[in-house]
Image: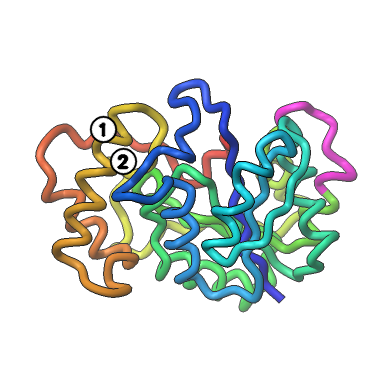
Amino acid sequence: MTAVIVQARLDSKRLPEKSLLPLQGKPLIFRVMEALNRVAGDIRVLACPEDCAETFRPLADAARFELAPGPKEHVLRRYCMAIRRYKPDRVIRATGDNPFVFADAACAINREAESLGADYAGYGGMPCGAGVESIQSEALLRAEREAEREAEREHVCPYLYAHPERFLLHRPLAPPVWRGLSLRITVDTPADFAQAEQLYRALSETAPGDARYYGEVIIRARRALAGPLGQGRDPRDPRP
């Protein structure tokens, strides 16, 4: 069983309560879950801090996501609590600031991970905000047991990155159709959100149906927007 688990919070320092900002009439986190509903999985979970669970609950219900509250600062444990509760074999990890996640790329990297038996898989070279990670549940439970450094527990996957001798890591460059490292489509600042509004509107007007969730379509729409592209970070960056 595969669980699509997205992490979100309300106390972002750069853009407070960004999860609730309205993106074309719906909160940002709802748009993120809307995109993740196009990613193949058996169960979908919103993993949030306990202190904002009641704020997120109606949004999770509306998007047909389970709600899994957990520790605010220990995000690895938050994921592991969801694993113990729902018992998936594999987790597709996403973050709540990425409303333009590439659904087709997410499905592809998860298939690759399953076929290889990889403990961890994630594409490199994609736009900032486009990617997900596919992780064996047991690998995350092991990380929770063994990780000692704060940064390895505050985030989800650094312990895996740091121990390639213990885990089978699959970190290929994304296929050319999904590459665009110089493009930024995440929402981390007020400028990012203003750009997200433009991009969402453009996709609504030019990409009917599920096409708007395909990486090639999103890249084309982003490149058509005026203004600086910004320098993206690798989609495997562990920040929550």
Residue 170's spot in the image, x, y percent? 59, 60
Residue at position x 74%, y 46% in the image: 69
Q: Is 170 contained in the magenta span?
A: no
Residue 213 versus residue 21 in the image, above or below: below
Local packing at callout 2 (Cα closer than 10 Å; few below 14, some 14-19, many 20+) is: many
Q: Work out which quarter of the rendered image holds the C terminus and state it.
A: top right
Q: Evaluate if marks 1 and 2 touch, with contact meaning CB atoms under 8 Å apart.
A: yes
Indicate left or right for 203 with 154 as reference: left
* Displayed quadrant of residue 198: top left
Rounded to the nearest whole Å, what is the CA distance between mark 1 and mark 2? 6 Å
Local packing at callout 1 (Cα closer than 10 Å; few below 14, some 14-19, many 20+) is: few
Mark 1, residue position: 230
Q: Which residues are magenta?
A: 143-153
Mark 2, residue position: 184
Residue 1's spot in the image, x, y percent? 71, 76
Predominant secondary structure, magenta span = helix
Q: Secondary structure at mark 2?
A: loop
Indicate left or right for 172 with 25 as reference: right
Residue type (three-letter) at the residue carrying disc 2: Arg
Residue at position x 21%, y 59% in the image: 203
Residue 147's spot in the image, x, y percent? 83, 38
